Amino acid sequence: MGREYPAQYSKTSRLNDGTEIFLRPIKPTDDSLLVEMFNGLSKKTIQLRFFSTLKYMPKEQLERFTRVDYEKQMAIVALVREGEREWMVAVGRYTLDEKEEGAAEFAIVVQDAYQGRGIGTEVLWHLAHVAKLQNVRVIIGYIMDENTRMFAVLKRSGLTMTRRHWDRGITRVDIPIDENVQIQ
Ligand SMILES: CC(C)(COP(=O)(O)OP(=O)(O)OC[C@H]1O[C@@H](n2cnc3c(N)ncnc32)[C@H](O)[C@@H]1OP(=O)(O)O)[C@@H](O)C(=O)NCCC(=O)NCCS
């Protein structure tokens, strides 16, 4: 059953600055945390992630984002506890390509106030790890050429990948999972 919640893909990580983050697959009940995170994103971050200038998240998209068939897609959220409550600070997701077996398109977004602290790199690695366990062969990202921070994350991640020009202003990055992720 693709919709069964894969709780085993949850883990706690510590950033270099000591902050603890909790990574886990998204759940349907994450609606309000996700909307809250989305509403806190800058225009630039929205543009780099969605390639458009979405002002709010339409209900239908919200449902699609939170109600995931985990066999076909994955969405890993990063949560940080501040005082009494948790905040969603990042989401990394991949969606399997229906035409190309074992290939999935991925994207990551980190809330502006939390960028540059290592969260994007953590989410990328965890997503790649989960992809391996789900028998995904390659994750593919389409990245705006101006997105120096994402290219820096890819470089610092140490993951091997191929890069090629895709469309005007867009680079396609293919990350082969077997080459990069070993499961003991
Ligand atoms: C691109 C994006 C996902 C990267 O996430 P991030 O959390 O900012 O990335 P990281 O913090 O892991 O790495 C970025 C920076 O932090 C630094 N960093 C990396 N690991 C670190 C660590 N453990 N501790 C401290 N800093 C670290 C890196 O040096 C890098 O610095 P630089 O930008 O000065 O080169 C995020 O900036 C974002 O959401 N951007 C908008 C949406 C987007 O572009 N998505 C990509 C489409 S696929």
Image (cartoon, helix red, strand yellow):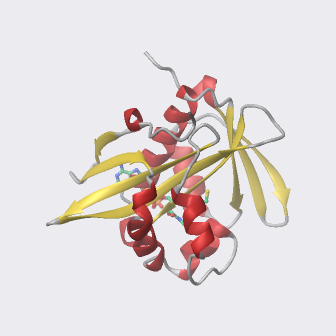
Give x and y (percent) for residue 76. 47, 48
Give x and y (percent) for residue 181. 53, 26
Residue toward you, 15 or 5: 5
Give x and y (percent) for residue 108. 55, 56
> How many numbered marks are there?
0
- Identified at 47% across, 19% down, the residue is 183
- Identified at 56% across, 76% down, the residue is 57
- Height in image: 115 above or below 158? below
| Residue lying at the far top of the rendered structure | 184
- Identified at 81% across, 36% down, the residue is 100
Give x and y (percent) for residue 42. 50, 79
- Height in image: 72 above or below 38? above
Give the side of residue 37 with respect to residue 92, left or right. left
Quarter of the image where one finds residue 132: top right
Quarter of the image where one finds residue 35: bottom left
For the N terminus, the quadrant is top right
- Height in image: 74 above or below 60? above
For the C terminus, the quadrant is top left
| Residue lying at the far left of the rendered structure | 83
